[in-house]
């Protein structure tokens, strides 16, 4: 896809299609990380700092709730069962 910059006051702007924004999970208020790597301009949504913590919390809850069942599934049907 080829895009051209458009004038925005004294600066220039790159217009992105709504479909691209949806695919990237970008909304109007999403902070964006902009960097240059090798001759390419890379634009990506800034990761949510609390997302990893929420994931770890949910994972721990899953282990507590389903840990024994998951362990039995991993061991397979022929593994001895604890009394």
Image (spheres, rainbow, N blue to C red):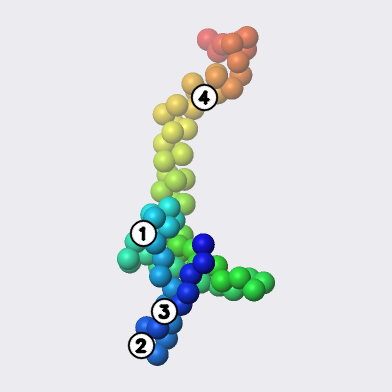
- In the image, residue 19 above or below residue 5: above
Decide which of tag 4 and tag 1 comes sooner along the chain.
1
Name the residue tied to disc 1. 18
Residue most extreme to the left: 28
User: What numbered label is drawn on residue 6?
Assistant: 3
Give the Cα separation between the discs numbered 4 and 1.
Answer: 41 Å
Nearer to the camera, 53 or 42: 42
Quote the CA–CA distance across marks 2 and 1: 23 Å
Q: Position of residue 60 (x, y in %)?
A: 46, 39
Depicted 80 relative to depicted 55: above or below: above
Query: In the displayed structure, does residue 28 sit left or right of residue 12?
Result: left
Check disc 1 and report its element: helix, strand or loop. Answer: helix
Which residue is drawn at the image coordinates 44% and 68% (left, top)?
A: 32
Label 4–label 2 contact, CB within 8 A: no
Q: Residues within 10 Å of mark 3 (few under 14, many from 20)?
A: few
SS class of the residue under badge 3? Answer: strand
Residue under pointer 4: 70
Give how far apart the Cα atoms at labels 4 and 3 are.
54 Å
What residue sits right under mark 2 in the picture? 9
Of labels 4 and 2, the one closer to you: 2
């Amino acid at each position: 896809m080829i895009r051209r910059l458009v004038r925005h006051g004294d600066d220039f702007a790159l217009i992105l299609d709504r479909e691209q924004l949806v695919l990237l999970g970008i909304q109007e208020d999403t902070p964006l990380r902009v960097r240059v790597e090798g001759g390419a301009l890379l634009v990506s949504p800034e990761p949510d700092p609390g997302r990893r913590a929420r994931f770890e919390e949910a994972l721990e809850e899953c282990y507590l709730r389903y840990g024994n069942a998951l362990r039995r599934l991993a061991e397979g049907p022929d593994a001895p069962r604890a009394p």
